[in-house]
Structure formats: structure tokens, C-alpha cells
Image: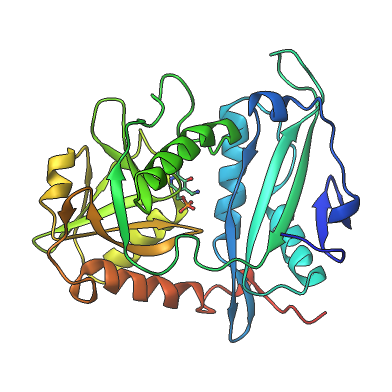
Amino acid sequence: YFDDNTVIYLDGKFVKANEASTDLYSQTLHYGYGVFEGIRAYATKDGTQVFKSLAHYERLKKSAELIQIPFDYSPHKLVEVTESLLKKNDLTDAYVRPLVFCDPNMTLARPNNVSIMICAWEWGAYLGDKQLRLTVSSFCRPHPRSIKIEAKVCGHYVNSILATNEAKDKGFDEALLLDSDGYLAEGPGANLFFEKDGVLFTPQLGNILPGITRATVLELAEELGIEVQQGLFEPKELFAADSAFYCGTAAEVIGIASVDETKFPKAWKDSLGKKLQDAYSKRVRESSTPATIFSTKL
Ligand code: PMP
């Protein structure tokens, strides 16, 4: 993720990644009490676009507020910082990882001070580009009354890691998690959509992370005249679907070939997912949002 020349942003300064340090007594390290984001930058014909950068920093702020971590940063300023960070590291197509972490504090009390770091690196398609073979996880997503499920909190990812490990140990590519009532929820790091008789279905907000890619897919579906229904869906509805896909910043839009023993009948090339995958790759490289475009040439 970094070499001797990599620069990261840490609490108002750009510093060498291999010289930056943190405190081993951080509350975040011990209790998972921190928030983070995952953002992608894309090369466009007019320069680099950090896709939906402001939306990501607004979600970071909201995540912090939802779990009562003080957040005194301006999302607009963080958008600018990210652009400088990419320039300093000479990155165009890149993944950006902001993390808000807490001061040394071994109690369970609210932190007084927090730090922010932002790093970036070149990263290909997170789940590859082949259609995924999923398995329904024995782990469910955390109950929304146990945690703030709509916040992107460090500690929540223990659930994602356990589900991923289990799926890989069973020989699958990726897990599919249900919510604690047994309805379809999401992947360890992506949101779910499925197609049946020309209509798209996706789990409603409430028991899932409100994905920014999910929101983009909803926008694209509307532009393409594709009907989407959001709701609580049972696994049997997915098993009867024609096709399905996952979407997320890191994963982008990626087809699902099967869930456990059930293979989806529709060829990916003919699916609504493929249409949306093409529209998504186009959208992220379009220079239609000038405010978010900048040149990596200093
Ligand atoms: N669900 C979970 C659990 C995730 O970790 C992610 C990745 N952030 C997503 C959904 C997709 O969110 P986004 O499109 O904002 O990356």
C-alpha cells in the first residue's frame, strides 16, 4: 500500500507514510471505535475525478456523529485535501482511505480528541471481474439496535471479516449476509441487487450500509428507465431471481453467478446488471461534474 515515497495526510499535515506513527493506546485500536471511508478516483479525459468525494466525506461525518465521535473537519476541505494527496502521490486511478481514529484512552468513555488520516493507493477491482459464487453466511448483519448499522464503523468489519473467511473456507468467492430477521441484507463490503421479470429489487435501508454506489445504481436505473423496488426480501426471492449483482466503491458493479447451489439462469451479458455495470463504468469516468475534476499535473 505504500513505499518510501508515499505521502499520507495526518491531522493537517502531509507526511511520509513510513515516518507516520500512532499511539498503541488508541481507543480505536482496542475497541474498534473509529469510522472510515472508501473512495475511488478515476482518470477522466479532463483529469482525475474523485467519484462522489463530497458524499463520502459527508457520510464519514455522519458516521462519526452517529457514534458520538467528535468530528470538526469540513467535508469540503477534506475533498480538497484528497485532491492534493493524489497529486502528491502522482495517483490518478486510485482508492482513497480516510480513517478517523481516537486518542489514547483505555476507558469506554467518549474521546476528547480524534485524529484523521487519509491514504491512497492504486487498487484494481476489489472482487475481481469474474462473476461471483456466493454462499449465504451463517453470520447475520448486526442488529440495528446493537450498533448504528448505517455508520461505517471500524468494529463493524469484524462481522464482514468473519463472513468472508467462512465463505472462502467453504470454497466460495464471497458471502451474502442476511439481517437478524432472516431477510436479505448485503455483502461484507457491497450492496445487493437482483433482477426478476425485468424489475430490479434491492434491500431497503435500515439493516444495511447506505451505499453510495447503491445510490448511483438507483440514479442510473432511473435514467435507463429500469424499475427498482426496495423492500424486505426473503432469500427464496433471490433464489428465484433471473440475475443478481453486488455493488460498492471497491467492488464497483459485479455480477453474481450463483448463491450456494442456485445458479442464476440469465446470461450476465443480457442482464440488467450488465447494463448498469456499463453505465457505472461510464459514469465514473465522465467529466460531467467539473467541481470534482482536477488535474494531477501540478
Ligand atoms: N455494505 C457494506 C457493509 C460495505 O462495507 C460497503 C462498502 N463501503 C457497501 C455496502 C457499499 O458502500 P459504498 O457503495 O458506499 O462503497
Q: Nearer the viewer, residue 79 or 284?
A: 284
Q: Quadrant of the C terminus?
A: bottom right
Query: Coloring scheme of the render?
Result: rainbow
Q: Residue 64, located in which quarter of the rendered image?
A: top right
Question: Which residue is at 44% across, 43% downward?
Answer: 164
**Where does residue 107 sit, x and y in percent of width and height?**
74, 12
Q: Is residue 274 above or below residue 72?
A: below
**Picture coordinates of residue 287 (x, y %)?**
54, 79
Position of residue 232 relative to residue 8, above or below, is: above
Whether residue 209 is visible here, answered yes or no, is no
User: x%, y% of residue 46?
Assistant: 62, 85
Query: Going by the image, does 27 lie left or right of 263?
Result: right
* Marker count (numbered): 0
- Relative side of 100 to 195, left or right: right
Image location of residue 162, percent across then percent down: 46, 35
Q: Give the vertical position of 75 relative to 289 (above or below).
A: above
Name the image quarter holding the N terminus. Answer: bottom right
User: What's the residue at 63%, 29% (across, down)?
Assistant: 32
